[in-house]
Amino acid sequence: MLQALRGQGDACNTVVVAFHAGFDSNRTSYWDMRCADGSAYRARLPSERFAGAAFLRCGAAAPAPQGGPCFQPVASAAVLAANTGRPGSETQCRAACATQPAAGQNMCVQRCVSGQGIEVGVQASAALPANSRFGAMYFTDNPVPAYGFANGATDRLDVNMRAVRSCQTMAGRVPCKFQGELVNQCGAVAMAISRHPMAMVMTADLSTQVLNLATIGQGADKAAAEAAALQACRRAEGPGVQCRVMASGC
């Protein structure tokens, strides 16, 4: 997001605070960012794949939720209706969610009532089978061995958000990057890891590790996905460098 913000001509050298404000009723995601110079922006990330991000300075005179104050949760249309005393908001949510895949309807209603949006698998192609499962894989560039993996959900946007949050929690300020999507497949992330030259021993702490190569694999089952990820990873193996499966699932 920092690169996209700079691409629009905004002078933000470093993002010191990033806050996920939530989703609106169209499953558009909003992120608030404060830069080192004190400026603050709200990013609007549409749910459509490959759609571009839009940025406004916090407090800008624009319709909510993109304009106005930042660093507070975004409320969906259902929640706004409930707050203004209009009856039947839960009934409206259930009616809207009835068009979604059966396996995701209860979660859809919960998200709608709590203000997190109502669409399940909004980007799914009509050609995909009903109740298709999605997954996403993220990891950082060398040398930080941070990764995020989530799979098996019917909500395509939600599974991506869970994966990138997991990765970013590990990576800190180092940006995590989208590496691949899973559709009705098992997946795995493998990494070729070596000891950091400043560490006496390599432990589970990321500061003691160096990432040499990260790879992904897909397959009909977990074992096949792990085997594919490891096969791609082994070209980086050597003295002191060993491939490991970091995450996998169906």
Image: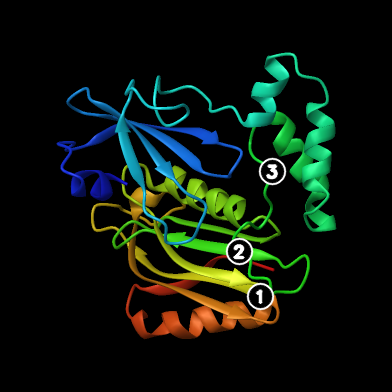
Task: Residue at 70% x, 38% y: name it.
Answer: 111
Give the mark toward the camera: 3 or 2: 3
- Looking at the image, is 195 positioned above or below residue 228? above
Work out how far the residue at label 3 is from the one at label 1, CA to CA, in angstroms. 25 Å
Three-letter residue code for mark 3: Ile
Residue 111 lies, with reference to residue 223, above or below; the image says above
The mark that comes first in sequence, 1 or 2, is 2
Q: Residues within 10 Å of mark 1 (few under 14, many from 20)?
A: many
Amino acid tagged 2: Gly
- Relative horizontal placement of residue 83, taking residue 138 as reference (left or right): right
* CB contact under 8 Å: marks 1 and 2: yes
Q: How far separated are the C-alphas under marks 1 and 2?
A: 8 Å
Which residue bears the numbered disc 2?
Answer: 135
Question: On the rendered structure, is 157 left or right of 46?
Answer: right
Q: Nearer the viewer, mark 3 or mark 1?
A: 3
- Residue 215 x, y percent position in the rendering: 44, 74
- Of the numbered discs 3 and 1, the one sitting upstream in the chain is 3
- Helix or strand or loop: what does disc 2 sit on? strand
- Between 250 and 236, the residue placed more toward the observer is 250
Label 3: state its secondary structure: loop
Identified at 64% across, 83% down, the residue is 224
Point out residue 2 in the picture as x, y percentages from the top left corner.
27, 45
- In whole angstroms, how far apart are the C-alphas of marks 3 and 2? 19 Å
Mark 2 neighbour density, 10 Å: few (under 14) some (14–19) many (20 or more): many
Is residue 122 found left or right of 194 in the rendered image?
A: right
Q: Earlier in the sequence, mark 3 or mark 2?
A: 3
- Badge 1 is on which residue? 185
Q: Amino acid at mark 1?
A: Gln
Task: Check disc 3 and report the residue beneath it.
Answer: 118
